[in-house]
Image (cartoon, rainbow, N blue to C red):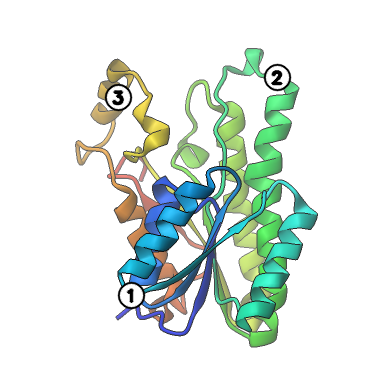
C-alpha cells in the first residue's frame, strides 16, 4: 500500500524539518526524491545521503522558489534528466510574525513572494509536465493558522490561507487530466521552527490541542505519502488537517 516505485518526487524546502521528513518518507515508499534547498547545502546533502544509505534514490537541487524563472528552469531540468515528474510537495516557506499595526510592507511582500508565488510557480511548472503524462500529484503545505488565524500572524496566516484557495482552484483546472491537488495543514509540530517558542507560549498552545501534545514531522510526512499515492487518486481539492484536533 502507498507504493511509489518508479515515481519522481520534488520536495521544496526539503533539507530540514517537515521537508526532510517528507523526503525520507517518500523515498521509503520507493520514489526518487529531489531535495530542494536554498541555504545549507550540507543539510540537504545529509538528507540525500541518509536516503541513499537506506537503499533509496535522492539528489539535491538548489533553487529559490521566490525566484520564478529559476524555479521554472530547475523543474524543467529535473523532468528532462529523469524523464518525468510525478509528485510535487510545495513545502518551502518562511514565517515572519508581527501584529498588523507593526507589520512592514517588505515583510508582507517577502512572505507572499515565497509562500504563495513560490508555491504557485512550482505548481505551474510541475503541472505542465504532469499534464503531458496525464497523471500527477501536487501537495501544498499550509498551516492550521491558515484556517483558524492567530494573533501576531496576520500576514503568515493570510499566505497559508491563500494556498488553500489556490489548491481548490487548481484542482478544478486539472482534474480532467487526472492531476490531483491537495493541501496538508499541519498544527503545532515539533520542528526547528517551533523550538524557539517560549515554554509559556507552548504550554498555552498545548492546552488548545485536544490530543494534548505536539505533532511530529513524520506524521505530516505520512499524510503527504498518502496524498501522493495511487490510493488517493480520487481525492482532490482537499485540506488534510494534521493538528491533533486544534482546529476541526
Q: Is residue 92 above or below residue 106?
A: below
Q: Quadrant of residue 82?
A: bottom right
Q: Secondary structure at mark 2?
A: loop
- Whichever of labels 1 and 2 marks the residue nearer the N terminus, that label is 1
Q: Residue at x 30, y 54 (%)?
A: 219
> Which quadrant of the figure contains the N terminus?
bottom left
Determine the residue located farthest toward the left in the rendered image. 212
Closer to the camera in the image, 237 or 231: 231
Closer to the camera in the image, 171 or 130: 130
**Numbered label attached to residue 55:** 1
Mark 1 in CB contact with mark 2 (< 8 angstroms) = no
Q: Secondary structure at mark 1?
A: loop
Give left or right: position of 110 versus 233.
Answer: right
- Label 3 crowd bin: few (<14), some (14–19), many (20+), radius 10 Å: some
Q: What separation in Å lies between label 1 and label 2 (alpha carbons)?
A: 47 Å
- Label 2 crowd bin: few (<14), some (14–19), many (20+), radius 10 Å: few
Q: Is residue 237 above or below residue 109?
A: below
x and y, in percent, of residue 37 in the image: 57, 51
Q: Residue at x 53, y 50 (%)?
A: 13
Determine the residue located farthest toward the top in the rendered image. 101
Mark 3 in CB contact with mark 2 (< 8 angstroms) = no
Q: Is residue 95 above or below residue 113?
A: above
Closer to the camera in the image, 136 or 28: 28
The residue under label 3 is 202
Q: What separation in Å lies between label 3 and label 1 (alpha carbons)?
A: 38 Å
x and y, in percent, of residue 93 in the image: 57, 43
Q: In the image, which is nearer the foreground, mark 3 or mark 1?
A: 1
Residue 80 appearing in the image:
yes
The residue under label 2 is 104
Q: Residue at x 47, y 55 (%)?
A: 45
Residue 15 appearing in the image:
no
Q: In the image, which is nearer the foreground, mark 1 or mark 2?
A: 1
Amino acid at each position: 500500500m502507498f507504493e511509489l516505485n518508479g515515481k519522481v518526487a520534488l520536495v521544496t524546502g526539503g533539507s530540514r524539518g517537515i521537508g526532510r521528513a517528507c523526503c525520507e518518507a517518500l523515498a521509503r515508499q520507493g520514489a526518487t526524491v529531489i531535495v530542494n534547498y536554498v541555504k545549507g547545502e550540507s543539510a540537504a546533502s545529509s538528507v540525500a545521503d541518509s536516503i541513499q544509505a537506506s537503499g533509496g534514490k535522492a539528489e539535491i537541487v538548489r533553487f529559490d522558489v521566490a525566484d520564478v524563472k529559476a524555479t521554472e528552469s530547475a523543474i524543467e531540468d529535473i523532468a528532462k534528466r529523469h524523464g518525468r515528474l510525478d509528485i510535487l510537495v510545495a513545502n518551502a516557506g518562511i514565517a515572519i510574525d508581527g501584529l498588523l499595526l507593526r507589520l512592514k510592507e517588505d515583510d508582507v511582500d517577502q512572505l507572499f513572494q515565497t509562500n504563495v508565488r513560490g508555491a504557485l510557480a512550482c505548481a505551474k511548472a510541475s503541472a505542465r509536465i504532469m499534464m503531458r503524462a496525464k497523471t500527477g500529484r501536487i501537495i501544498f503545505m499550509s498551516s492550521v493558522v491558515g484556517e483558524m488565524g492567530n494573533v501576531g500572524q496576520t500576514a503568515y496566516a493570510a499566505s497559508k490561507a491563500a494556498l488553500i484557495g489556490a489548491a481548490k482552484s487548481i484542482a478544478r483546472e486539472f482534474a480532467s487530466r487526472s492531476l490531483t491537488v491537495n493541501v496538508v495543514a499541519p498544527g503545532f509540530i515539533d520542528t526547528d521552527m517551533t523550538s524557539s517558542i517560549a515554554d509559556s507560549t507552548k504550554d498555552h498552545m498545548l492546552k488548545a490541542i485536544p490530543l494534548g501534545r505536539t505533532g511530529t514531522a513524520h506524521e505530516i510526512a505520512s499524510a503527504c505519502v498518502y496524498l501522493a499515492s495511487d490510493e488517493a487518486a480520487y481525492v482532490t481539492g482537499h485540506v488534510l488537517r494534521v493538528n491533533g484536533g486544534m482546529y476541526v
